[in-house]
Image (cartoon, helix red, strand yellow):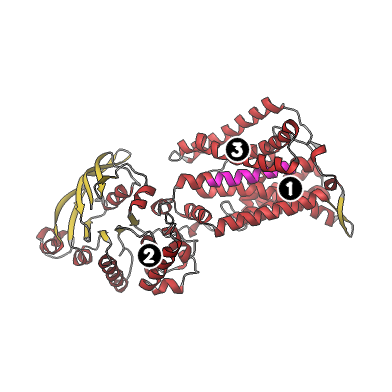
């Protein structure tokens, strides 16, 4: 469904992605794990067209989307929940959600999707008139995910949804991610919390200094000795 | 005397406010002080009298036409001068803005000459120069009433656009987090163009109103008004639209009272003194957000 082939992305003269190749199939949860600075966020930003790859291609549903603008990529069905959540702090919760549906003109369906988000995250309904910046970290993450769902994505890119959240909130967020996936949304999940990510994912990729060094079914990666010592803190 | 000065100050202040929102909105979305904004204000006034004199357009349609032209000019300035510098250091864009300002001033001098010209008196309704009402010792002219009504209506309209429409919400979203806005599928450049169009249209109206109020136009009129309105935007808290409105009114009233009670020679100085005092006490401006809030 979504595939990257030999993607090279630079920040100025810094070579951040050195030929990343990966595939996400329809209906899967695929996780991308790796240390800080391995290029996980850059991979997602290269898919979303925020940082345009210098070489290599990004294909979505059989079409080359490498050089498309972010707006066009979102319109085709790839939405990102960025690292650090990036909600709009001085827009209300409701306005944040409506920004997620910015490209849609089907008002009735947008309304229905808003209800659906409130059903997934009842806290957001309680706080719908509050500014996004007044929410707790967990609520902001819910808002960021809800906002992305408002675009009715085919593929959802999630960047570190567990970042800075209490363990119980993380569990809740990951349950919701699985539910969203069961509802038919394909997911590419970037995580430092490798344990959690590999438990919910079908397949995984390990990224090290801009290159994929290991890939396979999530279950196998959980058992892999290298992954266990480097990313799970087990031996 | 005090009441009279207050009403006069309000007239000036509302006009400053109309210019100041243009500065503050552009700053909000691209963090640029658009020093060419004062020139757009000047062009608005000249285009208006040109439509009246050369094409025989009546005053109000001429105002609308000038406003539309300036909205387009604002968008063009951004596309030609600022857009290529979006990723360049802020200083490059700032210097470019000063360059655009000088360029437009000189273009205006070539077209309309370097000497001040009067506003087309014959096009202005007679009621504007008469006293509309008297409040105790205060005389308020028809033009002043028109200025109050028009500027307040425009600021209400602007507030509604910013707070209630989809593009207005996108403007606020872009000002708060540009990356997130792009990730929502917001066409960032289109929203920036819209912001320039909106601010420039309002600036043009301000120019026309000042032209009528003082009955004089000059190619350099944008410089002083621009600096004043910029001060008003800073006073109110740069990036805040209600702040720019309030800042404009405060500055206008302070200046007029200063001119009335101290000396008219100190009028500009007193206006800036108020701004400096506010910035010393509240560095983020009257309604500005404190710096730490940018989550």
Residue B207: say if magenta.
Answer: yes
The secondary structure making up most of the magenta span is helix
- Distance from disc 2 to disc 3, alpha carbons, whole Å, reads 41 Å
- In the picture of the structure, the residue carrying the numbered disc 3 is B36
Q: Quadrant of the N terminus of chain B?
A: bottom right
Query: Looking at the picture, do discs 3 and 1 lie on one chain?
Result: yes
Residue closest to the eye, A101 or B138:
A101
Task: Judge depth for marks 3 and 1 and give the one in front.
Answer: 3
Residue appearing at x 65%, y 44% in the figure: B203
**B33 horizontally vs A124: left or right:** right
**Label 2 belongs to which residue?**
A146
- Local SS, label 2: helix
- Going by the image, does B77 lie left or right of A232? right
Q: Nearer the viewer, residue A83 or B170?
A: B170
Mark 3 vs 1, N-terminal side: 3
Q: Does the magenta portion include A158?
A: no
Q: Which residues are magenta?
A: B194-209
Discs 2 and 1 lie in a common subunit: no
Name the secondary structure under disc 1.
Answer: helix
């Amino acid at each position: 469904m979504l595939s990257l082939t030999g993607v090279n992305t630079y920040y100025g003269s810094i070579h951040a992605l050195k030929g990343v190749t990966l595939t996400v199939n329809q209906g899967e949860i695929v996780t991308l794990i790796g240390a800080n600075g391995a290029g996980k966020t850059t991979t997602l930003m290269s898919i979303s067209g925020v940082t345009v790859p210098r070489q290599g291609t990004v294909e979505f549903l059989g079409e080359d989307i490498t050089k498309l603008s972010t707006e066009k990529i979102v319109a085709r069905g790839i939405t990102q929940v960025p690292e650090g959540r990036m909600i709009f702090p001085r827009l209300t919760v409701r306005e944040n959600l409506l920004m997620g549906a910015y490209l849609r003109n089907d008002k009735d369906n947008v309304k229905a999707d808003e209800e659906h988000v409130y059903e997934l995250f009842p806290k957001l309904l309680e706080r719908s008139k509050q500014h996004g910046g007044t929410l707790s970290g967990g609520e902001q993450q819910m808002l960021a995910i809800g906002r992305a769902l408002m675009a009715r994505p085919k593929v959802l890119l999630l960047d570190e949804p567990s970042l800075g959240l209490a363990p119980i909130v993380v569990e809740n967020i990951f349950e919701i991610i699985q539910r969203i996936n069961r509802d038919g949304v394909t997911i590419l999940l970037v995580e430092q919390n490798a344990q959690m990510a590999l438990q919910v994912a079908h397949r995984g990729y390990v990224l090290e200094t801009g290159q994929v060094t290991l890939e396979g079914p999530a279950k196998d990666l959980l058992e892999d000795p290298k992954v266990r010592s480097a990313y799970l803190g087990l031996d | 005397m005090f009441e009279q000065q207050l009403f006069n100050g309000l007239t000036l202040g509302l006009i400053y406010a109309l210019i100041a929102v243009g500065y503050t909105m552009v700053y909000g979305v691209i963090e640029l002080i658009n020093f060419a904004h004062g020139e757009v204000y000047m062009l608005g006034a000249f285009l208006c009298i040109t439509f009246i004199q050369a094409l025989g357009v009546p005053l109000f349609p001429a105002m609308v036409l000038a406003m539309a032209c300036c909205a387009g000019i604002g968008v063009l300035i951004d596309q030609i001068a600022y857009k290529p510098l979006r990723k360049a250091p802020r200083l490059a864009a700032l210097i470019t803005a000063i360059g655009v300002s000088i360029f437009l001033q000189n273009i205006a001098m070539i077209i309309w000459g370097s000497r001040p010209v009067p506003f087309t008196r014959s096009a202005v309704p007679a009621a504007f120069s008469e006293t509309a009402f008297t409040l105790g010792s205060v005389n308020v002219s028809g033009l002043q009433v028109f200025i109050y009504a028009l500027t307040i209506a425009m600021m209400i309209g602007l507030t509604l656009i910013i707070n209630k429409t989809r593009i207005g919400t996108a403007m606020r979203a872009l000002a708060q987090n540009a990356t997130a806005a792009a990730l929502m599928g917001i066409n960032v450049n289109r929203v920036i163009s819209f912001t320039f169009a909106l601010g420039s249209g309002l600036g043009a109206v301000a120019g026309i109103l000042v032209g009528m109020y003082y009955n004089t136009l000059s190619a350099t009129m944008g410089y002083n008004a621009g600096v004043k309105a910029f001060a008003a935007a800073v006073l109110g808290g740069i990036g805040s639209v209600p702040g720019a409105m309030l800042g404009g009114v405060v500055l206008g009233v302070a200046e007029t009272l200063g001119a009335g009670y101290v000396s008219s020679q100190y009028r500009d100085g007193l206006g800036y003194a108020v701004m400096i005092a506010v910035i010393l006490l509240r560095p983020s401006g009257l309604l500005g957000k404190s710096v730490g809030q940018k989550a």
